[in-house]
Amino acid sequence: MDSFGGYTHVYWFANQLLGLMMVSMRLGRLLPIFCGLVILGGFSTLLGTEVRTFTNNEGQSIQASLESVDDTYVEIRREDGRRFTIPLQTLSREDQEYVKKWVSLQAISDERLFEISAKRLDENETKSTQTGLDIEERDGFYEITLENRTGTNLNDLEVRWAIRVEKTAAGEVHDRKADLWTKGRIKDVDLSDREEKELETGRVLLREVKVQSGYRWASNAPKNARDKLDGLYVAIFLDGMMIREYSLPSGLLEEGRDAMRLEEQEKLLFGR
């Protein structure tokens, strides 16, 4: 018989035998294993595969990875593949906190349970004129919507965002455009189960310049020049770990990651 922290499995589980007899009836409620892939800075981590030392309230321990959880029981798997179902309350307080965090990570990694969406908006439009020009200015931004259907409250999330802005230089012969990134973060985001929350990114000043009838640029440049928001990248962090990402349009993920990576490098170089 295999030993468990110096004791046999029989001794370790003896006090929980009655509860374990209910396992077969409760397995249908276990949170299924997700294969959520977390990507950050070129490295990847599979959630739920970490081997750690679990300790019960009597000080006995076992090396295993967490497989599934419900309100009362956890299922763990030793490195030799053997599985055990254990009453949650028999674990140490530290292990119970780990389980709580694990459940949040697994749930958020499922797009069906934690939904991210966004839309482009603008406000505060102003109009002015200069000789031969009509000028419109407005504040552009994105509204990010988070919807929590995970069955658990999510606290202290950090939402990092990056907006790609296409700036067009008025009066340039070749209608020169430049893609610029502006970035920011929203900290301490709490989201109760079944709650939907709207968050706003920072504002970007967008300008549209139109040449009036009877005028033209001396350089024969195109008459109109218009700035626009050209995309959004969002990364969701929990306890410093990136657990979800999103982009609008969907093909902007890689560029968004690069923009975020550059921000982290700047912080290291310049202490910003």
Image (cartoon, rainbow, N blue to C red):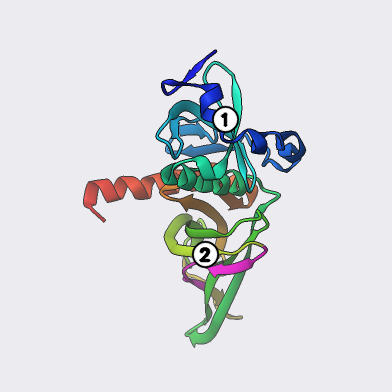
The percent coordinates of residue 165 (x first, y second) are 50, 60
Q: Which residue is drawn at 55% across and 63% down?
A: 229
Which residue is the extreme one toward the left? Answer: 270
Q: Is mark 2 on a helix, strand or loop?
A: strand
Point out residue 182 in the picture as x, y percentages from the top left corner.
Answer: 43, 60
Q: Which of 219 and 134 is in front in this view?
A: 134
**Marks 1/2: CA–CA distance:** 40 Å
Magenta segment, prevailing SS (helix, strand or loop): strand
**Label 2 is placed on what type of residue?**
Asp
Q: Callout 1: 10 Å neighbours few (<14), some, many (20+)?
A: few
Residue 36 vs 112, above or below: the answer is above
Report x, y in % for residue 148: 64, 59
Residue at horizontal 50%, vertical 27%? 64
Residue 118 point in image, percent of width and height: 63, 61
Q: Is residue 28 left or right of residue 210?
A: right
Residue that label 1 marks: 14
| Magenta residues, start to end | 194-207
Does 211 lie within the magenta span? no
